[in-house]
Amino acid sequence: MSKTNTIEDGLTYARDVISGEIVACELIKQACKRFKNDYERSIDDPDCPYYFDEEQVNHWLHFCNEHVKHVESEATGQPFYLEGFQVFLTMNLYGFINKRKDDLFVRRFKYVTLFIGRKNGKTLLAAAMTLYHLLYDGEGLKAYAVANTETQANLVWAVARKIIYRLPDSLKNKFKLDATKIEMIEDLSNFNTLSGNIKALDGLNPSFCVMDEVAGIKKREQLDLIFSAQGGRANYINLMITTAYTNKGTRFFEILELTKRILSGEATEETADAYFGMIYELDEGDEWTDRDVWIKANPLIYATGNQNYLLTDYELAITSAESELQFKVKHLNLWEKPLNSWLRHGDFEACETEDLKRTGELHIGIDLGGSRDLTAVAYLYSYDGKDINGHITKNFELEVKFYLPAASMSKNVPGRYLQLYQSAVKTGELVLSETETTDYDQVFDQIVEYAKDKNVASISYDAYKAGELSTRLQKHFVGVSVGAVSQSMLSLTAAVRRTEEIIINQQLVHTGTGMLLWNFANCFFYQDSNDNIKIIKGEEPELKIDGAIATIISMSVAMTVKKSSGLGVVLTK
């Protein structure tokens, strides 16, 4: 690359990605194709709602090349020359300008995502962009470095402070620095940090936000409050830079999924045109151990010697489960489950079948939620079969039904999960009641109807919430083992281990329906000093595991009963 950046660097990057000269994932190819189409349209179509301002891009590139210096590592003091992908990213942001009748200068893109592996130059780039904003985007500006922790938020802020010290005096003297604030002397524009304190967000009017490792921000309100606070500004930018994480239940993950749909041309939202993203990740089917695909998540792998850094971490990854997880998530942008996930990724999904026989002994497990919460009924069939090695063993079939008051569906289900719930209703996996609270009559009636002509061996439930339902079940299912199961760790550990075992060994098949898969994916475990295990849900309160708990309850009894001569079952000691 030349020692002076030009727009041609970004155009060349886009051309080389599209042609395959540069190895890139499908989403980066889509981003380059989108730019190509939009750039050509801005030139050829007089009705295009935006234009491309080369002067703006050149001004930004000149600022970086002439004024910004590296402030870390062996490159300290050297001019900041952007790599091709960095020119491409910023020329999209600074180049596309909306056409307006009032001639107000308003950039097209307001939500910019850079989803990229570690050690790919994001911090210096973000700090330079923030200072450029304060220097040239007007007066009364408020920039923030936003992160889940104060330490993370300080990273970009601290680099920006170091850059200021190396600016030429004509620019450096525009800033006033103290221990906690970067401020413009003339108009009091400033750059501060924000972390997990939601109350600190009240009254903000941010014009530029660098959201560092935004995928790790757990409180969705933190982003929503920032976005809503920007409503009074015509020109604002949210730069979201991050690696992957182990938790998909965040506000950023929704933004990432929207950006992917925009790049693929599937998004129909009116606001879609305000989003731009460069999503560096492996493609489906890529093997994480294949070094040739690492560049898809690490565009600077060769330009900066990152390959040696990655190789060192890779050698650790193949010797330690924890190191493997970190390598996949932070270097390759794979959304992996944390190590305390109950099941390995893909194990439960591998047990899907479209053909349940619904034969053998039937063990029914019931996990009763709160009066306005999800209730799950698991139907677990046990029969003689073979394991994956052909050995004679017990095999199982699983089907789960869920119940919820319709009012809870409309009031309590978050928007990001609404489609999941609605799909479950359409397939019959989720049954809604018209009552304000859980309709236990409906649950009872459906259990009775389902169990007709079935070889019911046991019905078990959590005694804490069973109440009248347990009495009705005992009266109806005469000769069947109907009773409560303790929810203590000691009581359920064996059932948890047995359920995990039959899933791993593919001795269980299930319907593969959406709500069931989601419930099992939400399962984490806690293990005490005596190796007892308890299944718990993830940190997000809206996650549900009722279907998994109902399955474990049914398994706890299936392990301890044997068929008597004809009528029901008896408990073994």
Image (cartoon, rainbow, N blue to C red):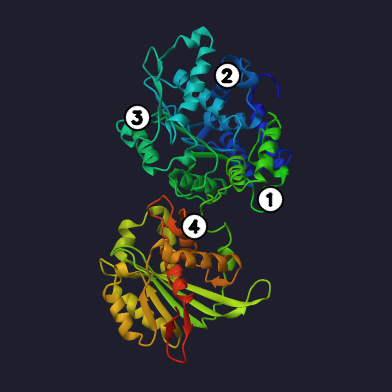
Name the residue nearer the viewer: 463 or 84. Answer: 463
Label 1 and label 2: CA atoms lie apart by 36 Å
Q: Quadrant of residue 483?
A: bottom left
Q: What residue is pinned by disc 3? A: 205
Q: Is residue 196 left or right of residue 527?
A: left
Residue displayed at 59% across by 72% down: 507
Q: Amino acid at mark 1?
A: Glu
Question: Disc 1, disc 2: CB below 8 Å?
Answer: no
Q: What residue is pinned by disc 4? A: 531
Q: Quadrant of residue 458?
A: bottom left
Name the residue nearer the viewer: 469 or 238. Answer: 469
Mark 2 vs 4, N-terminal side? 2
Q: Amino acid at mark 4?
A: Asp
Name the residue nearer the viewer: 215 or 136. Answer: 215
Residue at the extreme top: 169
- In the rendered image, the quadrant that contains the C terminus is bottom left
Q: What residue is pinned by disc 1? A: 287
